[in-house]
Amino acid sequence: MFIAFEGVDGTGKSTQLERCQAWIESLGREVLVCRDPGSTPLGLKLRELLLKRSELQIDIESEMFLFMAARAQMVAELILPALAQGRCVLCDRFLLSTVVYQGYAGNLDPQKIWEIGSVATRGCQPDLTLVFDAPLEIAMQRLGTGRDRMESRGDAFFAAVRNGFLTEAANHDTLRVVDASGAAAEIHDHVRKAIEPFFK
């Protein structure tokens, strides 16, 4: 099974992924955890370029293709082999993030990004995508001040990001919105309820 954890920065998706990993492993299942971009040598180099090098001028289309390149490598090198071995894959962000951040918030065509992403991922898509959602004031407060290149784009940008996630979730059966405004334990309960039917 392949599960992606998505949402606006500051909604706690990374924390919930760690809790989910521990829970699934407690069930006796092998888990591969990935971070997009990242997880491979190429992906880590591209992550540094995309998130830390704020002095670089990167056009929005170039940015989209750099994310796709990191994702293509991760799918080929890690995700497809893990799924072939019967392991459960948990991924901190995947194609939906590019659809939302570079599409809805970056003014590229979301449908075109889905099409390009299908090529980059060899058609590999999550069985379930959890979209963590919270009011922006809560997410931005959790995010704090030490923000990377993507996290520093302002309230209007993140309002468009949140709208993109919710719009896509309303149009895809494999996307589930998780209320991320509460305590971590409460959010984890929501996550388990969303995943448990896939394990039956």
Image: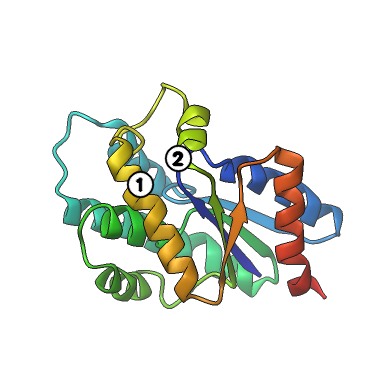
Where residue 47 sits: x, y (%)?
A: 36, 42
Q: Is residue 125 left or right of residue 64?
A: right
- Quarter holding the N terminus is bottom right
Where is 95 relative to 7, above or below? below
Label for residue 159? 1
Where residue 116 sits: x, y (%)?
A: 28, 72
Which element is circle 2 on? helix
State the CA–CA distance, disc 2 to disc 1.
7 Å
Question: Which residue is painted at 17% across and 34% down in the image?
Answer: 56
Tell me the crowding category of disc 2: few under 14, some 14 to 19, or many 20 or more residues within 10 angstroms, Cα based.
Answer: some
Contact, CB < 8 Å: mark 2 with mark 1? yes
Pick the residue in front: 62 or 159: 159
Where is 190 relative to 11, above or below? below
Label for residue 15? none
Where residue 32 sits: x, y (%)?
A: 64, 56
Q: Amino acid at mark 2?
A: Leu
Question: Which residue is painted at 45% across and 51% down in the image?
Answer: 36
Where residue 159 sits: x, y (%)?
A: 35, 46
Pick the residue in front: 163 or 71: 163
Residue denoted by label 2? 136
Question: Which residue is painted at 47% across and 64% down in the image?
Answer: 75
Pick the residue in front: 118 or 80: 118
Question: Which residue is painted at 36% across and 31% down in the image?
Answer: 148
Q: Is residue 159 left or right of residue 140?
A: left
* Numbered circles on residues, count: 2
Q: Amino acid at mark 1?
A: Ala
